[in-house]
């Protein structure tokens, strides 16, 4: 398809925002003009659908066979770099380009002109009756500016009827004015920090990447090393250069503290983009990014597809985090796609982490990324002292989960008036419930997974599909009363033990399923101000938080995740342990961390105890290279699913037999996926492994195009560069 600059002819190719493999041709009626990137409405299968003008059509069509473009929206056309990003993501992930485009066209409300707001302005006339309430309103309007009604009510503390009375008296007049901007422009010179010598050296390295050219820096610094202050100054440089900045965070729950820090540095909050926003907020943010009034955005991974026109920097904070991988719809990794978009935009990328992904660390080792190190904690705070507790030699008492030595350390910490954190990366009360009379184990009816007991809510829940049922009083298999027992601990069970052991401690439990985002933000704020002594949490508490009084971290199952047969298990375990132990010992307090483990000699545990992360990366990179795994090789997973197991398995066999031969390619399977059923669909996995320079996306595309086609309820889902093997 030809991409023409400027205004196009009367027939154009339009990519619609639905799951289609390419653009459709439409006629541009007289009176409308479009360019590549124009957002339009077109008829499709009997309804009006959003789309984007992709260029000139590849084929010639008779005018009478084409339907007309219905409308051209009055918003800036999408930038060329964003259109190229959509194309690239589509080709790489094997996702229909229309489906990728839907990530851009997320807010149809943003395409409509913003509604004017009602405002009031003083006329200079005195009302006949001047009450104290009326005086308050008129005092506010003495500046001669128009005030929105809601702002007047909020600032004066009067009721809306007072304002309406003043309008009837002629003392104020009603106006319709444009709404105020959703956020103000950040000031890059509002409150520059005083950087340490090491932070300044790190910033100088990042500044060596030209502000108007593509480049990637891996900001690799210890927890508490001041990485945020460094990349904020790089963002300030971007804003001074007249370009927009995007900061991606892995968790919405982390955003409140981060936004406060941003506002303190730049004098105002940035634009926000995440699933917790209202439709109106999303619409106003989308439009503000498109028209350039919003200069900086902090958001979740989907913010990567916002319609920036002057994108100059993308920062991924906690770049190693698994939340940057989207595993439904379009399977992409925001870290990798951020680098792609930045290349098209001529922008800089900062990947920030205390535990960089093995892929990013290898790119830095090879010189593809500038490796920027921060090895010391800010304000001379010391890294925590990490000790193992060998559970074979120092086990807890029967029925308990906190080892005696760790319990003694918690008592001592609380006695000093400091905070302690007990970490277990397992939600709920217990991961398995069974009947001691007949052995029946409670399993999800729609997934091949055990139901997790959530005792505080009185339910058994599946963490894969969300199915839940009330916890029964008697066994549903044999009918025995009071025969159900909990096997293994979750954080609720640990909290129960902690409440009995440390009865005077003010305790809080934190996990992603215990409250809304707003409630979680409130809990974090309360921890920061010292309202709790003992924190019990999952990985939600492991990253991005600064708790000044926290001096002790106890990890109750440091081995969790090491024995899952996942090639990334060691990396994930090292990252989560480093992040959670790094919460201990901020500011002036020395920190301690204890790892309860049955495998104290495991390379991950040894790296943690010795504080030797280089040994971990060297070991992990060598193991990956020996196995031909990323970053030294490439993987693609094909998940075949169906309502019944046998048709899924048989189709996987047929698909495997149709795979073309290719040098350097290995195919594995078919095999039932580790979680063999989710939401009632049986899952069978094929895995393709190739060398690093092999076009694996192109191979899988050719394979599927020429292989058997899925029919009925069969589905084939492709995941290039899978992060999980579940």
Image (cartoon, rainbow, N blue to C red):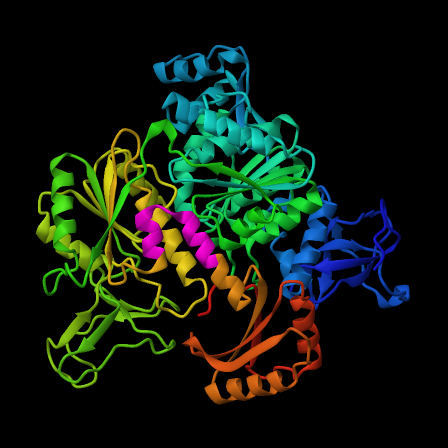
Looking at the image, can residue 228 be seen? yes
Residue 5: where, in percent of width, then height?
A: 85, 46
Residue 654 drawn in magenta? no
Residue 309: where, in percent of width, then height?
A: 68, 39
| Secondary structure mainly formed by the magenta segment | helix
Residue at x 56%, y 46% (from the top left corner): 364
Give the quarter of the figure containing the N terminus: bottom right
The answer to whether residue 651 is left or right of residue 382 is right
Looking at the image, can residue 113 be seen? no
Give the quarter of the figure containing the C terminus: bottom left
Is residue 698 depicted above or below 590 in this figure?
below
Residue 618 drawn in magenta? yes
The answer to whether residue 519 is left or right of residue 341 is left
| Relative depth, front residue between 624 and 242 | 624
Is residue 683 depicted above or below 558 in this figure?
below
Residue 528: where, in percent of width, then height?
A: 28, 35
Q: Which of the 4 image quarters holds residue 532?
A: top left
| Relative depth, front residue between 405 and 504 | 405
Residue 391: where, in percent of width, then height?
A: 19, 61
Residue at x 66%, y 67% (from the top left corner): 697
Span colored in magenta:
604-620
């Amino acid at each position: 398809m030809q991409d023409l600059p400027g205004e196009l002819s009367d027939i154009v190719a339009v990519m619609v925002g639905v799951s289609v493999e390419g653009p459709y041709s439409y006629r541009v009626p007289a009176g409308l003009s479009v360019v590549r990137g124009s957002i339009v409405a077109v008829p499709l299968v009997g309804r009006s659908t959003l789309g984007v003008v992709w260029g000139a059509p590849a084929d010639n069509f008779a005018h009478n066979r084409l339907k007309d473009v219905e409308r051209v929206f009055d918003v800036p056309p999408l930038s060329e770099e964003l259109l190229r990003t959509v194309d690239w993501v589509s080709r790489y992930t094997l996702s229909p380009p229309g489906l990728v485009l839907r990530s851009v066209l997320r807010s149809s409300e943003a395409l409509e002109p913003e509604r004017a707001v009602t405002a009031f302005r003083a006329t200079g006339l005195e009302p006949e009756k001047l009450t104290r309430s009326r005086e308050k309103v008129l005092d506010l309007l003495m500046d001669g500016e128009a005030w929105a009604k809601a702002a007047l009510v909020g600032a004066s503390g009067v009721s809306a009827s007072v304002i309406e009375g003043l309008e009837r008296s002629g003392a104020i007049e009603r106006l319709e004015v444009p709404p105020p901007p959703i956020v103000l422009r950040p000031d890059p010179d509002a409150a520059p920090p005083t950087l340490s010598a090491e932070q300044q050296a790190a910033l100088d390295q990042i500044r060596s990447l030209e502000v108007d050219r593509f480049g990637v820096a891996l900001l690799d610094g210890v927890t508490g090393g001041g990485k945020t202050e460094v990349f904020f100054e790089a963002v300030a440089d971007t804003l001074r250069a007249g370009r927009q900045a995007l900061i991606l965070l892995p968790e919405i729950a982390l955003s409140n503290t981060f936004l406060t820090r941003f506002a303190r540095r730049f004098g105002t909050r940035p634009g926000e983009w995440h699933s917790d926003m209202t439709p109106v907020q999303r619409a106003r943010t989308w439009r503000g990014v498109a028209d350039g009034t919003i200069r900086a955005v902090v958001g979740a991974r989907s913010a990567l597809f916002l319609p920036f026109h002057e994108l100059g920097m993308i920062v991924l904070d906690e770049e190693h985090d698994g939340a940057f991988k989207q595993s439904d719809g379009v399977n992409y990794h925001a870290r990798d796609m951020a680098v792609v978009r930045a290349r098209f935009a001529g922008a800089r990328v900062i990947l920030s982490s205390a535990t960089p992904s093995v892929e990013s660390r290898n790119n830095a080792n090879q010189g593809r990324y500038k490796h920027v190190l921060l090895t010391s904690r800010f304000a001379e705070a010391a890294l925590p002292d990490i000790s193992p507790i060998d559970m074979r030699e120092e086990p807890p008492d029967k029925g308990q989960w906190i080892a005696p030595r760790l319990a003694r350390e918690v008592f001592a910490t609380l006695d000093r008036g400091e905070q302690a954190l007990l970490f277990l990366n397992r939600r709920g009360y217990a991961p398995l419930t069974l009947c001691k009379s007949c052995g029946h184990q409670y399993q999800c009816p729609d997934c091949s997974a055990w139901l997790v007991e959530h005792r505080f809510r009185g339910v058994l829940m599946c963490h894969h599909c969300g199915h839940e049922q009330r916890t029964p009083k008697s066994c549903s298999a044999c009918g025995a009363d009071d025969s159900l027992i909990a096997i293994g601990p979750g954080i609720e069970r640990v909290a129960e033990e902690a409440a009995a052991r440390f009865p005077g401690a003010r305790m809080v439990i934190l996990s992603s399923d215990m409250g809304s985002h707003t409630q979680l933000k409130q809990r974090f704020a309360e921890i920061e101000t010292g309202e709790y002594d003992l924190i019990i949490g999952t990985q939600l508490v492991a990253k991005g938080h600064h708790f000044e009084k926290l001096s002790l971290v106890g990890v109750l199952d440091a081995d969790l995740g090491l024995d899952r047969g996942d090639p990334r298990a060691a990396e994930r375990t090292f990252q989560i342990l480093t992040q959670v132990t790094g919460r201990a010992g901020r500011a002036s307090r020395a920190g301690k961390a204890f790892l309860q483990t049955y495998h104290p000699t495991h390379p991950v545990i040894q790296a943690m105890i010795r504080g030797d992360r280089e040994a971990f990366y060297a070991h992990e990179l060598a193991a990956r290279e020996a196995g031909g795994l990323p970053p030294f090789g490439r993987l693609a997973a094909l998940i075949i699913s169906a309502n019944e197991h046998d048709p899924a398995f048989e189709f996987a066999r047929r698909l495997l037999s149709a795979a073309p031969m290719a040098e350097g390619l290995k195919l594995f399977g078919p095999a039932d996926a580790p979680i063999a059923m989710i939401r009632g669909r049986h899952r069978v996995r094929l895995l393709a492994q190739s060398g690093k320079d092999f076009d694996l996306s192109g191979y899988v595309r050719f394979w599927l195009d020429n292989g058997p086609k899925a029919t009925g309820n069969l589905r084939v889902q492709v995941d290039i560069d899978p992060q999980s093997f579940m």
